[in-house]
Image (cartoon, rainbow, N blue to C red):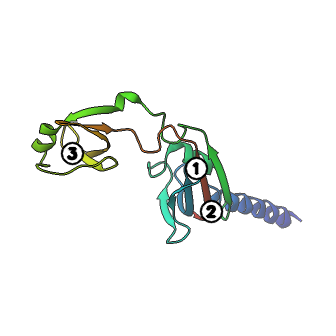
């Protein structure tokens, strides 16, 4: 009778380990399909029609609000989450809308470049080790108005996810 009890305990522990391995935890490596929709239902990102995404939770590949929705989901889950305005990419910050002199753009190597509203322009960080982007909002005679907020800042979003694999 004693071996039976050990077998039952082992079986219960194995089942517990199995359920933990197959649920999303901080640091999990995931294979998933996901779809992100804007407030009007427009699809912003969609992996369902192509290869699934692979990512490591906590590595910054998804916004923290999106990652937090995945914690605890079991492998195979397919769910849709509503993200409140500003929850995923922050609120729209008017201080991040700035005029940039055309002469500065010329110094950065964009001499005689033509711009139109909606263009995305890459800028080097002050230390030159990386880049950041701004969207052209307005054109002036000797300046351009750039919005350096994330394009989805301040917007309500829908986040649909189908977990294919959890390691």
Q: CA distance from mark 1 to mark 2?
A: 22 Å
Image point (12%, 38%), residue name:
103
Indicate whether 66 appears above or below 148.
below
Which residue is nearer to you in this view: 151 or 117? 117
Q: In the rendered picture of this protein, how many numbered marks are placed on residues? A: 3
* Among the 4 quarters of the image, the one containing residue 74: bottom right
Which mark, residue 129?
3
Circle 1 packing at 10 Å, graded few (<14), some (14-19), many (20+), is few
Q: Is residue 72 visible?
A: no
Residue 46 in the image: x percent, y percent? 52, 62
Asked if residue 160 lies left or right of residue 126, the reply is right
Image point (12%, 50%), residue name:
112
Circle 2 packing at 10 Å, graded few (<14), some (14-19), many (20+), is many
Which residue is nearer to you in this view: 78 or 119? 119
Residue at mark 1: 40
Please report whichever mark, 2 or 3, sits nearer to the chain's N-terminal start. Answer: 3
Asked if residue 122 lies left or right of residue 105, the reply is right
Asked if residue 15 lies left or right of residue 153, the reply is right
Q: CA distance from mark 1 to mark 3?
A: 36 Å
Q: Quadrant of the N terminus?
A: bottom right
Residue 39 in the image: x percent, y percent? 58, 46
- Nearest to the eye among marks 1 and 2: give it: 1
Residue at mark 2: 162
Circle 3 packing at 10 Å, graded few (<14), some (14-19), many (20+), is few
Image point (45%, 34%), residue name:
92
Residue 142 in the image: x percent, y percent? 16, 36
Q: CA distance from mark 2 to mark 3?
A: 35 Å
Circles 2 and 3: CB distance less than 8 Å? no
Q: Secondary structure at mark 2?
A: strand
Q: Secondary structure at mark 3?
A: loop
């Amino acid at each position: 009778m004693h071996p039976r009890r050990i077998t039952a305990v082992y079986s219960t522990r194995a089942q517990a380990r199995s359920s933990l391995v197959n649920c999303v935890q901080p640091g999990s490596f995931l294979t998933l399909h996901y779809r992100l929709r804007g407030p009007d239902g427009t699809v912003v990102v969609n992996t369902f029609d192509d290869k699934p995404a692979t990512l490591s939770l906590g590595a910054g590949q998804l916004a923290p609000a999106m990652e937090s929705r995945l914690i605890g989901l079991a492998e195979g889950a397919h769910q849709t989450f509503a993200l409140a305005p500003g929850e995923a990419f922050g609120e729209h910050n008017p201080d991040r809308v700035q005029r940039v002199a055309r002469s500065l753009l010329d110094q950065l190597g964009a001499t005689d470049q033509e711009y139109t509203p909606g263009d995305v322009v890459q800028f080097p960080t002050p230390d030159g080790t990386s880049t950041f982007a701004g969207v052209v909002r307005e054109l002036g005679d000797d300046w351009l108005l750039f919005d350096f907020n994330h394009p989805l800042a301040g917007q309500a979003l829908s986040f649909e996810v189908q977990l294919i694999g959890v390691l």
